[in-house]
């Protein structure tokens, strides 16, 4: 028992109480959230997992490690989504506990590979498998039904130039892998002399990945410029807020007509139009007149019951001086509880304790690339939550989009970390795809990024009601991530499959003494005790 405690549990005489350990695990699990906006302590991500890993490696049993993996995951989810509390109320705890289960097997994996004093071989396995296990968690929870890929640890590096270059190679997935690998290597350096060499090798690989990506990864090639105006009406309250928001957007847009600088596209935010434009030709006429006054098409977002099919859709639509251009994109991926209630028959009670959707929105069927009349610029629209999904922007670029445009609304979460976190995702999507991206919101934060993820001009904060024109450099060519997609995910799967195969081979390896092997003879001494 003493040997087992020294290998995997707390050192003899220093065992902490389960309650104290549980509290420490909750805090350790929540710690990485500080690397994201609004704190934006990006550098913290490289060490933020170390406390949690140190606790997991000293778990007194595998069952305890599973429990502490779940508990730390619960802390991470609640901290990452704490701004949802006013909407979900007590259900935020349920959400955290359910999603936290994804980290339970990871806790066991960490204890198995980092517990005690790992050998060099176990150190190599840890540097490869612990990050791979974390990436599998991110992959599973990226499913829309589980909340989508919000808070992927790689996304914390959205304003770090070398990280954005790495994102162009392997997307946010590669960033997550490398960040967790660094944390794992630091734990090995601190706890095992035998595993220091693989730990140092892991850190060296990460360190070399940055200049390699900087020097050899293809960069987007300049291909002209376009001027995009972002209209941010700001917070509008009251019973008739939808109409007032439209009026304010109209007023701000009209102000563009008196400027010396021409614009090529005007972008309104998500839910900027609250009625179907086919049913309301008066609204469509006002938008067409605006387009004519400004001399540019308007990309609006309609959140309304459609006239041509049943249900409510969120749709990105182009309006020119002649009216609707015929281009339309219906949002595909919806926000769980915010725009639909999963398994409503079972979970419909959530609407009585929070601000969940009273009626499910309907989904579109496919991504759509819209072409601007006149200059033929091809834009790839995304609506709100969809900017969190790397595959969606990649698909639009592969379909020919030259400019990514996100229409969003985080009005419900004013004063929280959500607006900054949401805007930061556009930088990653731009860097991954090698295309500039416009992130337009109702109430901020609105921002524009070039094809390498660098910010253009000034972002519009959550207290502003204004419009801004951005000179956006266009780009062509293809990033490695756009070409090869989620290859870090497949690599992580291969690592875990290989580790499982090795572990299985060792478990089921035949004994050296088969059925026909001679048995060792026991010699008894004069005292009658067995003697070898």
Image (cartoon, rainbow, N blue to C red):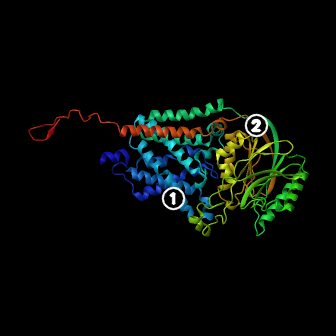
Task: Residue 476 in the image: state x and y as whole percent.
Answer: 75, 35
| Residue 130 relative to residue 216: left or right | left
Q: Residue at x 65, y 52 (%)?
A: 421
Task: Residue 499 in the image: state x and y as whole percent.
Answer: 45, 38
Q: Nearer the viewer, residue 281 or 232?
A: 281
Q: Residues within 10 Å of mark 2 (few under 14, many from 20)?
A: many
Q: Nearer the viewer, residue 47 or 69?
A: 69
Q: Earlier in the sequence, mark 1 or mark 2?
A: 1
Q: Residue at x 68, y 42 (%)?
A: 394
| Residue 68 relative to residue 81: left or right | left
Distance from the alpha carbon under mark 1 to that under mark 2: 43 Å
- Residue furthest to the left: 526
Give the vertical position of 262 relative to 337 (above or below): above
Q: Secondary structure at mark 1?
A: helix
| Residue 180 relative to residue 403: left or right | left
* Image disc number at residue 493: none
Q: Is residue 346 visible?
A: yes
Q: Which residue is mark 1?
A: 97
Task: Residue 368 in the image: state x and y as whole percent.
Answer: 74, 47
Give the vertical position of 247 relative to 9 (above or below): below
Q: Secondary structure at mark 2?
A: strand
Give the vertical position of 510 relative to 339 (above or below): above
User: Which quadrant of the view contains residue 390?
Assistant: top right
Q: Is residue 89 visible?
A: no
């Amino acid at each position: 028992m003493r040997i087992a405690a020294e290998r995997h549990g707390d050192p003899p005489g220093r065992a902490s109480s389960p309650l104290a350990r549980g509290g420490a695990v909750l805090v350790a699990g929540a710690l990485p959230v500080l690397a994201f906006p609004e704190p934006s302590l990006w550098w913290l991500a490289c060490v933020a997992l170390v406390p949690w890993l140190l606790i997991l490696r000293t778990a007194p049993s595998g069952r305890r490690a599973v429990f502490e993996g779940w508990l730390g995951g619960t802390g991470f989810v609640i901290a990452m989504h704490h701004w949802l509390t006013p909407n979900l109320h007590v259900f935020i705890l349920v959400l955290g506990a359910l999603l936290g289960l994804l980290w339970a097997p990871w806790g066991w994996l960490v204890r198995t590979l980092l517990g005690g004093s790992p050998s060099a071989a176990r150190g190599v396995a840890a540097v490869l498998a612990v990050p791979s296990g974390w990436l599998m968690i991110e992959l599973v929870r990226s499913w829309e039904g589980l909340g989508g890929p919000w808070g992927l640890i790689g996304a914390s590096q959205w304003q770090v130039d070398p990280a954005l270059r790495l994102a162009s190679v392997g997307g946010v997935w590669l960033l997550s892998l490398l960040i967790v690998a660094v944390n794992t290597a630091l734990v090995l350096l601190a706890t095992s002399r035998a595993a220091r060499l693989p730990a140092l090798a892991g850190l060296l690989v990460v360190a070399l990945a940055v200049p390699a990506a900087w020097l050899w990864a293809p960069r987007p090639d300049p291909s002209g410029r376009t001027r995009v105006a972002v209209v941010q009406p700001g917070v509008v309250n009251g019973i008739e807020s939808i109409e007032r928001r439209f009026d304010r957007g109209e007023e701000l847009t009209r102000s563009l007509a008196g400027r010396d600088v021409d614009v090529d596209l005007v972008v309104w935010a998500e839910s900027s139009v609250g009625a179907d434009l086919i049913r309301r030709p008066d609204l469509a006429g006002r938008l067409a007149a605006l387009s004519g006054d400004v001399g540019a098409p308007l990309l609006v977002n309609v959140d309304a019951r459609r006239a041509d099919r049943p249900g409510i859709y969120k749709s990105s639509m182009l309006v020119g001086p002649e009216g609707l251009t015929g281009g339309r994109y219906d949002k595909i991926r919806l926000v769980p509880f915010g725009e639909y209630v999963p398994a409503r028959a079972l979970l419909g009670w959530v609407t009585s304790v929070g601000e969940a959707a009273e009626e499910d929105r309907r989904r579109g069927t496919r991504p759509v690339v819209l072409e601007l009349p006149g200059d033929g610029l091809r834009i790839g629209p995304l609506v709100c939550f969809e900017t969190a999904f790397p595959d969606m922007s990649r698909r639009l670029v592969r379909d020919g989009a030259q400019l990514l445009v996100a229409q969003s609304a985080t009005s419900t979460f004013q004063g929280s970390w959500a607006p900054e976190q949401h805007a930061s995702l556009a930088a990653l999507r731009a860097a991954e795809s090698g295309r500039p991206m416009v992130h337009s919101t109702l109430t901020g934060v609105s921002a524009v990024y070039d094809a390498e993820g660098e910010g253009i001009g000034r972002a519009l904060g959550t207290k502003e009601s204004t419009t801004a024109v951005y000179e956006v450099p266009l780009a062509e060519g293809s990033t490695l991530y756009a070409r090869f997609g989620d290859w870090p995910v497949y690599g992580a799967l291969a690592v875990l499959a290989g580790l499982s195969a090795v572990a299985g081979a060792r478990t089921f390896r035949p004994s050296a003494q088969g059925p026909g092997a001679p048995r060792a003879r026991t010699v008894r001494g004069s005292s009658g005790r067995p003697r070898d």
